[in-house]
Image: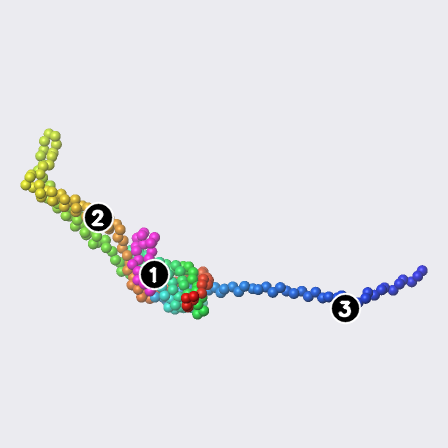
Amino acid sequence: MAPPSPPQMKEFDPERISFEVERKEEVEEKKEEPTLFIPLGFADAVLLNGVDAPTLQYGRSNPHPVLLHLRSEVILANNRHLDLRECFVLGSAYGELSSERAYITLGRISCINSQGKIYQRKVEGVVVDADGKTGLRGRLVSKFGSVLAKSFMAGVLDGIARILQASNTVISVSPLGATGTVPPEDAAVVGIASGFSTAAQKLADFYIDLAQEYFPVIEVQAGREVTVVFYGGESLDEVSTLRTSLE
């Protein structure tokens, strides 16, 4: 039996050996624009415009806009601060007769940083007066009195004209009923009284309709120093970049 042949060695060819190097694809990470989160807090502000806040149901459904200028950093919990100084806050104001206050709810905040990036978003919150109560103490202005007084005077004139007209009318009673006749010498007086009565009645109705269109307002002057309370939970995203010159 022949001895087994020795194993044959494979030829080593350095030119045929290749190393595969795994290259990681470079993924370009998109840089996320920084956002500014507003937690619960409060800041000092100034009321830039005065307002005649409407009351009643009309006031709640048709509040008037007010503009607030933040003058201090927002004070947050745990002695933290958020710098929103010089930002503008737009709010809506309506009045309450019972408290004689104008209540302002926040609607939108607008800020521009040092790089000219504009941040704007809807926010929620209220405005507190210097006495620590929600709403701004104002002056109640109502024109009901003057309008109703004019309506009352028109009604009085209508009554006087009716009395003058009746006093110059002769009432005749017959089997067919009562009839009123005007003596010839009193015809001019009765005619004037009748016309005056009609005009006074229409004038009284006009003032009554006008009084229904009037509603009391709470008058608040501009320049009031107030406190803006943010409910928190909003993030201010960049919406645009300010251009310093026209292109």
Q: Tell me residue 131's x, y (percent).
A: 32, 64
Give whichever of 92, 103 is nearer the camera: 92
Residue 52 position in % (x across, y down): 29, 59
Asked if residue 183 is positioned above or below residue 33 in the image, the reply reads above
Q: Residue furthest bottom?
A: 114
Sort mark 3 into few (<14), some (14-19) or many (20+) by Cα contacts within 10 Å. Answer: few
Amino acid type for the residue under numbered disc 1: Val
Image quadrant for the C terminus?
bottom left
Magenta range is 47-66
Quadrant in which residue 24 is drawn: bottom right
Q: Secondary structure at mark 2?
A: helix
**Residue tagged by mark 2?**
206
Q: Which residue is mark 3?
A: 14
Question: Which mark is first along the chain, 3 or 2?
Answer: 3
Residue at the (19%, 46%) spot, across then down? 202
Residue to which mark 1 is pinned? 66
Report the side of 213 relative to 106 (left or right): left
Binning the other alpha carbons within 10 Å of mark 1 as few (below 14), some (14 to 19) or many (20 upward) gives many
- In the image, what residue occupies the spot 11% across and 34% down? 179
